[in-house]
Image (spheres, rainbow, N blue to C red):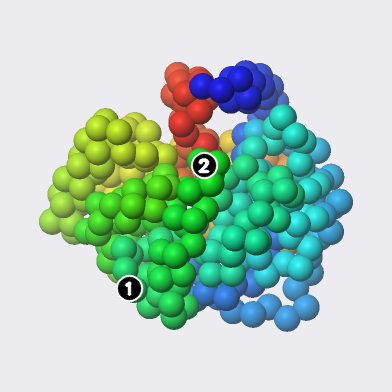
C-alpha cells in the first residue's frame, strides 16, 4: 500500500466513524443530469428532459458540506452531457484528501483527451458500464459501436498505470450467464471488474430478475467461479462476502431487508434535492436531515441490492479490512 493510500485509509476510517455516529452517509451519488444518450433495457433513463433544472457546481459543494461523505459519485443519466462537468468535479477536489471521487459513465462520449481533463479536474476512479462481452452490449444500450469503442479506449487508459478504471455489470437474467466472459474481457482491458444487481424498481420489468430455481442455481455456480477467480488473483472490486450476498438477494426472491439508505448512502438529484435512491425518485427532500427523519426512520423497502448499497452497508469488520487493503471502493 502506498503512503497516499494509507493516508486515505486512515482518513476514511476517521470519517467513517464520525459519519456513522452522526448518521450521515458514507457515500452520495450526485446525479448531475437525468438526460442520457443511451436507452438501456435495465434502466429508467434515456429520454431527453427539456429545460431540466440543474444545480450549479457551488450548490453541489454546499450539499457536500452538509454531509462530508467519504465518497462522492458523479453520475446520471450520462454526466458527460453536462457542459460544466469539469467545474462540478473541481468543486470537490481536495488533493491528497477525501472525498474520493468516482465518475460513472457509459463512456460513449469518453476519449483520451476527456479522460485527461477529468483526471486533472479531480476524478479518482472511473466506473464504466458493460452489459455483455461483445456487440450485444450495443443493442442493450441502444448505442451502435459502443463495445468496439470501449475495446479500443479502455486498454489505452489502463496502460497509463493509474489503476483507476472499474468496469461494472448490472446483472440481469439476460446477462448473468456471461459474467465470466465479461470478466475475461475486463481482464484483457487491464481494468477491475464490479457487479451490481438489477432491480425491477427502476423499470417495473420483473422479467429481468433472476428468479427461477434453475437460474438461481446457475447463478450460484457463477458466483462461486468468480470467487475462485478472485482468490486466484483476478481483479474483482466486489468482496467475497458481497458476492455471496448478491446471490442471496436473488435467492430470497429479489429481497434484501435492512436498507440504510439516507444513513449510509443517498442520491442528489440534478436540481439539488435529496432522494433516498434511484428506486424512490418520487420522494424528494430539501435537506439530508429531512430525508432521514421522513423516510429513513420508517423505511421498509427491500427491493434492491445495487453495488452502492452492498458496499456501504457492510459490517464494520469488512469496512476496516477493505479500507486498509484499498482494494474495494464504493460505486453504483
- Percent across and percent down for residue 63 are 79, 45
Would residue 295 be seen by someone viewing this image from the given angle? no
Kindly identify which residue carries mark 2.
161
Badge 2 element:
loop
Q: Answer above or below: position of 40 versus 14.
A: below
How would you rate the neighbour count of disc 2 (Cα within 10 Å): few for under 14, some for 14-19, many for 20 or more?
Answer: few
- Percent across and percent down for residue 76 are 62, 62
- Percent across and percent down for residue 155 are 44, 55
| Viewer-closest of 261 and 330 | 330
Identify the residue at horizontal 30%, vertical 33% (top origin): 233
Badge 1 element:
helix
Identify the residue at horizontal 25%, vertical 47% (top origin): 251
Front: mark 1 or 2:
2
Q: Answer above or below: position of 192 versus 232.
A: below
Identify the residue at horizontal 47%, vertical 34% (top origin): 328
Would residue 149 be seen by someone viewing this image from the given angle? yes
- Of the image marks 1 and 2, the number of the one nearer the N terminus: 1
* Residue 71 placement: quadrant: top right
The label on residue 188 is none
| Viewer-closest of 1 and 73 | 1
| Left or right of 179, for residue 125 | right
* Residue 25 placement: quadrant: top right
Disc 1 to disc 2, C-alpha distance: 29 Å
* Residue projecting furthest to the right: 58
| Viewer-closest of 51 and 157 | 157
Q: Answer above or below: position of 226 versus 104.
A: above
Kindly identify which residue carries mark 1.
136
- Percent across and percent down for residue 166 are 47, 48
Identify the residue at horizontal 26%, vertical 30% (top origin): 231
Amino acid at each position: 500500500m502506498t503512503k497516499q493510500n494509507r493516508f486515505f485509509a486512515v482518513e476514511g476510517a476517521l470519517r467513517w466513524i464520525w459519519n456513522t455516529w452522526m448518521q450521515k452517509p458514507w457515500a452520495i451519488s450526485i446525479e448531475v443530469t437525468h438526460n442520457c444518450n443511451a436507452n438501456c433495457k435495465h434502466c429508467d433513463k434515456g429520454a431527453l428532459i427539456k429545460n431540466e433544472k440543474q444545480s450549479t457546481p457551488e450548490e453541489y459543494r454546499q450539499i457536500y458540506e452538509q454531509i462530508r461523505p467519504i465518497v462522492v459519485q458523479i453520475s446520471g443519466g450520462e454526466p458527460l452531457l453536462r457542459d460544466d462537468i469539469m467545474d462540478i468535479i473541481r468543486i470537490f477536489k481536495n488533493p491528497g484528501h477525501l472525498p474520493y471521487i468516482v465518475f460513472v459513465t457509459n463512456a460513449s462520449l469518453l476519449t483520451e483527451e476527456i479522460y485527461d481533463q477529468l483526471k486533472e479536474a479531480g476524478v479518482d476512479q472511473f466506473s464504466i458500464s458493460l452489459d455483455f462481452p461483445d456487440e450485444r452490449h450495443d443493442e442493450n444500450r441502444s448505442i451502435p459501436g459502443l463495445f468496439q469503442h470501449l475495446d479500443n479506449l479502455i486498454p489505452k487508459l489502463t496502460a497509463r498505470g493509474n489503476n483507476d478504471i472499474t468496469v461494472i455489470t448490472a446483472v440481469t437474467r439476460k446477462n448473468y450467464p456471461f459474467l465470466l466472459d465479461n470478466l475475461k474481457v475486463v481482464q484483457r482491458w487491464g481494468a477491475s471488474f464490479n457487479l451490481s444487481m438489477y432491480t425491477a424498481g427502476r423499470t417495473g420489468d420483473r422479467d429481468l430478475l433472476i428468479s427461477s430455481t434453475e437460474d438461481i442455481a446457475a447463478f450460484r455456480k457463477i458466483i462461486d467461479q468468480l470467487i475462485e477467480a478472485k482468490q486466484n488473483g483476478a481483479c474483482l472490486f466486489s468482496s467475497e462476502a458481497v458476492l455471496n450476498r448478491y446471490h442471496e438477494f436473488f435467492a430470497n426472491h429479489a429481497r434484501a431487508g435492512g436498507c440504510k439508505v439516507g444513513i449510509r448512502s443517498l442520491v442528489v438529484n440534478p436540481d439539488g434535492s435529496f432522494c433516498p435512491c434511484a428506486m424512490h425518485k418520487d420522494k424528494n427532500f430539501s435537506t439530508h436531515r429531512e430525508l432521514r427523519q421522513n423516510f429513513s426512520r420508517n423505511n421498509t423497502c427491500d427491493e434492491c441490492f445495487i453495488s452502492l448499497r452492498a458496499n456501504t452497508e457492510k459490517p464494520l469488520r469488512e469496512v476496516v479490512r477493505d479500507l486498509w487493503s484499498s482494494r474495494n471502493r464504493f460505486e453504483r
